[in-house]
Image (tube, rainbow, N blue to C red):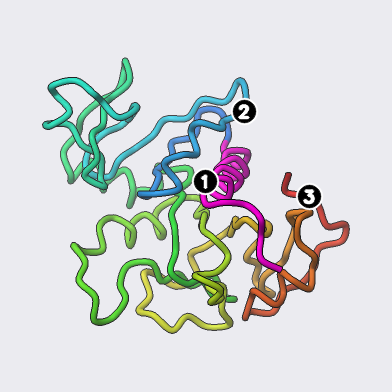
């Protein structure tokens, strides 16, 4: 059954649910697009340190000042640093990432599969600027959360096995979509929470990978 939610409602739902996964004091890296909306929905009393892999620790909101042309995030968008934040060089930034100092990374995906493999950087034959820091982030962060729409124009994105070139293998811990919350376990994918707008059968129909249903099954809203 197609959802009645529009694109922004879907983004809000997913970002809000992701925000509940973050703990006060976490150092968090956010991918471009939907993940950048997560800080808007952090619970009261929860503050996180945003790290941009191009060299900002304590990244702040998009700047509208003259300096915006000089300060950008990893996606090339205008950025800023909060009081107490810092600008660091690329080697130090990736030392933080590869050294396991990032508590969580939130990013989108083209495909995720039953083993937690991730494909999110290239569609063969299409132009792209490069992989960016995703390859390092998903193996260096303590927790990897994929935040994405469940399908692409009706085509499932959660597969038994990825068909696109992989970003990294067995790296994803949690998948959050507008249909539910799916945990990646050694025994496969487990639907732990569902959006009440959908039935279990509808979630399964939109998912190629086999899903185990948690008991009890929680609500994501």
Disc tally is 3
Asked whether 41 or 29 is in front, the reply is 41
Using a 10 Å C-alpha cutoff, classify the residue at mark 2 as few (fewer than 14 neighbours), some (14 to 19) or many (20 or more): some
Classify 10 Å Cα crowding around label 1: few (below 14), some (14-19), many (20 and above): few
Structural distance between the alpha carbons of marks 1 and 2: 20 Å
Res 43 label: 2
For the residues labelled 3 and 1, the Cα–Cα distance comes to 20 Å
Residue depicted at x 25% and y 45%: 74
Pointer 1 or 2: first along the chain = 1
Q: Is residue 170 left or right of residue 136?
A: right
Q: Residue furthest right?
A: 216
Q: Quadrant location of residue 56?
A: top left
- Tell me residue 30's x, y (percent): 40, 44
Residue 211, picture quadrant:
bottom right
Instruction: Give the number of the mark in front: 1 or 2.
Output: 1
**Element assignment for label 1:** helix
Kindly indicate the quadrant of the structure image that contains residue 43: top right
Residue on which the image places disc 1: 8
Magenta stretch: give its range: 1-22
From the viewer's perspective, is 6 left or right of 1? Answer: left
Residue 201 spot, x, y in % from top left: 79, 73
Q: Earlier in the sequence, mark 3 or mark 2?
A: 2
Residue at numbered disc 3: 219
The kind of secondary structure element at disc 2 is loop
């Amino acid at each position: 059954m197609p959802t009645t939610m529009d694109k922004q409602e879907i983004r809000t739902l997913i970002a809000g649910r992701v925000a509940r996964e973050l703990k006060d004091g976490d150092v968090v890296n956010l991918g471009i697009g939907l993940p950048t909306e997560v800080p808007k929905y952090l619970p009261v009393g929860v503050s996180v340190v945003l790290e941009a892999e191009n060299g900002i620790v304590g990244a702040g909101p998009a700047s509208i000042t003259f300096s915006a042309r000089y300060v950008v995030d990893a996606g090339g968008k205008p950025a800023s640093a909060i009081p107490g934040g810092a600008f660091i060089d690329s080697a130090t930034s990736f030392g933080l990432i590869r050294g396991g100092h990032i508590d969580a990374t939130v990013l989108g995906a083209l495909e995720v599969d039953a083993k937690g493999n991730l494909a999110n950087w290239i569609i063969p034959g299409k132009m792209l600027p490069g992989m960016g820091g995703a390859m390092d982030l998903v193996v260096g962060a303590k927790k990897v959360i994929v935040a994405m729409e469940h399908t692409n124009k009706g085509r499932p994105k959660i597969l038994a096995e990825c068909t696109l070139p992989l970003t990294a293998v067995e790296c994803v811990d949690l998948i959050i979509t507008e249909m539910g919350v799916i945990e990646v376990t050694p025994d496969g994918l487990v639907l732990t929470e569902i959006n009440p707008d959908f039935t279990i059968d509808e979630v399964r129909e939109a998912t190629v990978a086999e899903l185990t249903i948690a008991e009890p099954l929680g609500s994501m809203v």
